[in-house]
Image (cartoon, grey):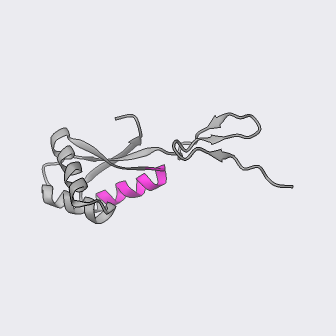
Amino acid sequence: MPVDLPRVDPGTGARTDLASGVQVRSETDGPWCTVVWNDPVNLMSYVVFVFRRYFGYSRLVAEQLMMQVHEEGRAIVSRGSRERVETDVQAMHSFGLHATLERAGED
């Protein structure tokens, strides 16, 4: 007899319980965001370098995100599951950037 697995909405990460039809979200489901914050220490060119090296962003995208950090004080640089975003935040810390995670839509 086949086992019914819960359906997962790829956009929200919500799981639908097949027995009840109710969507259920756990604390680790997406979407989460990595937020990089402005600081008075790192050069703008270094922030562009980090975004290109770690995330693989083009020079244009990395420069736009860096300018958002510089002008607005913060920028969302990645989205995904909580686990993925926690990894990204730790990576930003390892490069010396100040980063936090938050639920998407709370910015």
Q: Nearer the viewer, residue 89 or 72?
A: 72
Is 36 located above or below residue 51 in the figure?
above
User: At 17% from the left edge and 47% from the top edge, which residue is drawn?
Assistant: 67
Q: Nearer the viewer, residue 22 or 37?
A: 22
- Tally the numbered discs: 0
Residue 41 location (% of width, % of height): 13, 54
Residue 34 shown left or right of residue 72 in the figure: right
Residue 94 shown left or right of residue 87 in the figure: left
User: At 15% from the left edge and 41% from the top edge, which residue is drawn?
Assistant: 71
Please report the bounds of the magenta region as a residue range: 80-92
User: At 47% from the left edge and 44% from the top edge, which residue is drawn?
Assistant: 31
Residue 70 shown left or right of residue 12 in the figure: left
Residue 86 highlighted magenta (yes or no)? yes
Residue furthest right in the image: 1
Q: Quadrant of the C terminus?
A: top left
Residue 56 highlighted magenta (yes or no)? no
User: At 30% from the left edge and 50% from the top edge, which residue is drawn?
Assistant: 99
Residue 87 location (% of width, % of height): 41, 58
**Prevailing secondary structure of the magenta residues:** helix
Residue 4 shown left or right of residue 47 in the figure: right
Q: Quadrant of the N terminus?
A: bottom right
Residue 91 location (% of width, % of height): 34, 60
Residue 73 location (% of width, % of height): 20, 41
Q: Nearer the viewer, residue 100 or 9?
A: 9
